[in-house]
């Protein structure tokens, strides 16, 4: 009987880990298509490489410099 319970717990643990891994793979905040600061379109490559970016490269540099 104890074996059956252990097995069930292992199954629960397994599916829990599986769903956690799926959650971790979900994309975070989507990148903006247009720059927040100047309104220029953000290149698709940048949208995809920088998760959740909301400015173009130029404005991002300005923001970094202001920091
Ligand atoms: Zn910009």
Image (cartoon, helix red, strand yellow):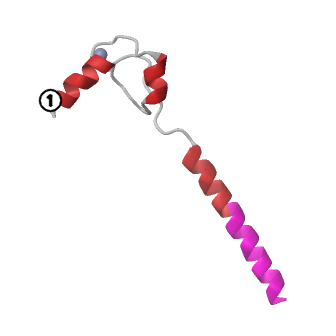
Residue highlighted by disc 1: 66
Q: Position of residue 55 (x, y in %)?
A: 33, 22
44 relative position to 34: left or right: right
Q: Would you identify the image quadrant in which residue 32 lies?
A: top left
Residue 17 in percent (x, y) is at 64, 61
- Chief SS of the magenta region: helix
Question: 49 or 18: nearer the eye?
Answer: 49
Left or right of 13, for residue 25: left
Q: Residue at x 21, y 27 (%)?
A: 63
Verify whether residue 43 appears in magenta.
no
**Residue 47, relative to residue 14: is it above or below?**
above
Position of residue 67 relative to residue 58, above or below, is: below
Q: Quadrant of residue 8?
A: bottom right
Q: Quadrant of the C terminus?
A: top left
Please give the name of the residue rendered at 45% of the width and 24% of the height, measured from the top-left corner. 47
**Quarter residue 60 falls in:** top left
Task: Kindly identify the residue that appears in the image at 24 percent across and 24 percent down.
Answer: 61
Give the number of marks: 1
Q: Quadrant of ligand 1?
A: top left
- Where residue 4 appears, as percent x and y from the top left, is 83, 82
The reply, left or right, for residue 18 in relation to residue 37 is right
Residue 2 placed where, x, y %?
80, 89
Helix, strand or loop at label 1? It is helix
Q: Read off the magenta span.
A: 1-15
């Amino acid at each position: 009987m104890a074996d059956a319970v252990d097995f069930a717990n292992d199954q629960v643990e397994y599916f829990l880990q599986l769903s956690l891994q799926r959650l971790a793979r979900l994309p975070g905040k989507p990148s903006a298509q247009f720059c927040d600061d100047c309104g220029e379109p953000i290149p698709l490559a940048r949208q995809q490489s920088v998760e959740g970016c909301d400015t173009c490269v130029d404005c991002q540099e300005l923001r970094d410099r202001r920091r």
